Image (spheres, rainbow, N blue to C red):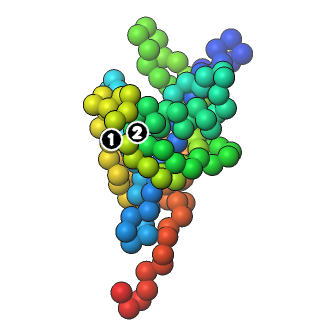
Amino acid sequence: MLDVSPKHPPLLESGVLAYRLDRRGEPRVLVVTTAKNHRWGIPKGRVEPHLSFGDNAAKEAFEEAGIVGEVTPTSVGMYRATKRRSTCETVIEVWVYLMKVTETLKDFPEKGRRELKWVSPQEAARLLREPCLAKLCQALPAGRKKSAAA
């Protein structure tokens, strides 16, 4: 059970569930490894006071994965998790924004510290393991419909 109380409020973070459409119009989701334990996740980070949650999420996406895109104006979901710090575990509350990726940069601040992978929404849901993120992956908009003759 996560200990969230007025004495220990969660740390606020925001991140993006980043996607793009492939040549067939099917969505592909970006997953990134965490810098420390190399588990699959989404680009996210602690909310900075001078940024909105959405702007903070876009900043994290650029820094961690070198992606730029259109971020939804409001959060599409939220989840809580624990984050291990040097001597304790801290509860984090992550506000998730969708990002339709419009540009992938070759150089970015955390290049080389993380692995990046574009996968199907089903594979992303399996790798991310967070129920909120899995549900969001399954609801991503597809592009063109496949015809029966194809």
Which one is in front, 1 or 35?
35
Of 30 and 102, nearer the camera is 102
Q: Secondary structure at mark 2?
A: loop
Which residue is most to the top?
87
Tell me whether circle 1 and circle 2 mark residues in contact (CB < 8 Å): yes
- Image spot of residue 58 (x, y percent): 54, 38
| Residue 99, above or below 6 | below
Q: Amino acid at mark 1?
A: Lys
**In the picture, which quadrant includes the N terminus?**
top right
Residue that appears at 39% across and 64% down: 22
Callout 1: helix, strand or loop? loop
**For the C terminus, which image quadrant?**
bottom left
Q: Residue at x 57, y 50 (%)?
A: 70
> Residue 27: which disc?
none
Q: For mark 1, what is the residue?
A: 106
Q: Quadrant of residue 39?
A: top left
Q: Is residue 135 left or right of residue 9?
A: left
Q: Residue furthest bottom?
A: 149
**Callout count:** 2
Query: Which residue does the image show at 50% across and 67% down from the upper left?
Result: 142
Task: From the top left corner, tell me how far across and down residue 128 is, in percent.
Answer: 41, 44
* Residue 142 in the figure: left or right of residue 148: right
